[in-house]
Image: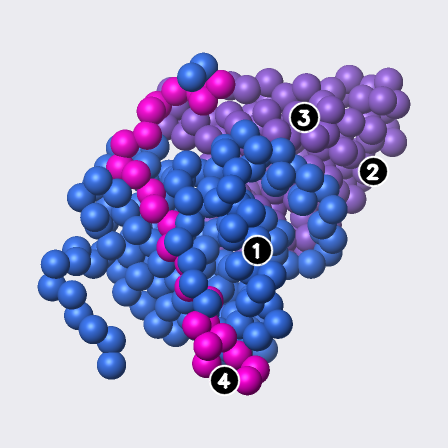
Amino acid sequence: MEQINLDEKVLLAYKGPFHLNILTVFGNYVRQVCCAENNAINKLYKVFFELTQNVAYYSADRNTLNDMSNAGIGKIFLTDESDNFRMTTSNLIFKEQANILVEYCEEVNSMDRESLRIYKSKKRSMLNPNKNGAHIGIIQVGILTLNKVDFKVEHVNDKHSIFTISAIVNKNYPLLNYNDE
Amino acid sequence: MNNLVIETLPDMPYFPEVNFNVDTGVCEICGESYMEDSYKFYAPVKDWITEYSQTGKRLEFHFKLTYFNTSTSRIILEILDLLKKHREAGHQLVINWYFRKSDPDMIDEVEDFQRESEVIINLIELN
């Protein structure tokens, strides 16, 4: 049973399949329900799709529709923390992916924004374009938010773990070209 | 060779609108792009550019994407690579990318595309 924290201002909580049509509805809702500068809303919207499509593509727990398309199952939690929004996703992963994901998140957290842009370009150039996903979503989250991601891996059983990641999106980002800073 | 027109459906906003005109060489991609299987959606787009390029005519490309996921960004680089080949073959090329002031991250995205693809992209701010 999930704990309810009455001090949290919850804007969205969902557990289930991350099919694209559901994500589209939630994405539009995120843009409408979050009160902040346009720049922050844009960032939140982009972070929403990077995190949720990671669950859709890579969750080890899958759901199949009548048309045989399938999507990952997971959880998303969006809260308003007065100065920022916190978006958290969780999903089941295979045990052998845990260390890879932890190293990936640590690597992203160790870099500044400009290093992340170069890292993204390098990874993007090595991708197979004929596959879903780009495996650079977490780098993009770091670039967009200018904050480190919180993450953890929890043991489930011999085969599976749960991967949880949180992104912090500030409510006020400067409305200027970052190159002018 | 025909025009390439893909319209956006209201219940599927994750597909962008595509409008490529074979007579004028003006090509537009508008809206959002975060579909699954992005490589399937963009296959006819890339095929059209490859075929058009063989005509040797001027190409004017307008990116009016307000959001695209990282998976789509990989395909955009492939499109830019095709456009680069068009220019390298000695044909005229103009690429414009439109963005809103409320989305300065888009400027960085386009700068990264420019650096990676080595093509000139004109950034145009929308009011």
| Residue at (48, 45) in percent of width and height | A109
Q: Which residue is mark 1?
A: A103
Identify by letter the chain in purple: B
Q: Is residue B126 left or right of residue A103?
A: left
Provide the secondary structure element on which disc 4 rests: loop
Q: Which residue is mark 4?
A: A157
**What's under tag 1, amino acid-wise?**
Glu
Mark whose residue sits in front, 3 or 2 = 3
Across and down, in percent, residue A24 comes to: 41, 56
Is circle 2 on the same chain as circle 1? no
Q: Which residue is mark 3?
A: B115
Region in magenta: A154-179
Frontmost residue, A28 versus A14: A14
Across and down, in percent, residue B97 comes to: 56, 25
Q: Could you tell me if the residues under marks 4 and 2 are in contact, i.e. CB atoms within 8 Å?
A: no
* Separation (CA) of disc 1 from disc 4: 21 Å
| On screen, residue A147 above or below A9 | above
Provide the secondary structure element on which disc 2 rests: helix
Across and down, in percent, residue B46 comes to: 74, 42
**What's under tag 4, amino acid-wise?**
Asn
Is circle 3 on the same chain as circle 1? no
- Which label number is shown at residue B51? 2
What colour do you see for chain A? blue
Q: Is residue A159 left or right of residue A5?
A: right
First-in-chain label (3 vs 2): 2
Mark whose residue sits in front, 4 or 2 = 4
Protein chain holding label 2: B
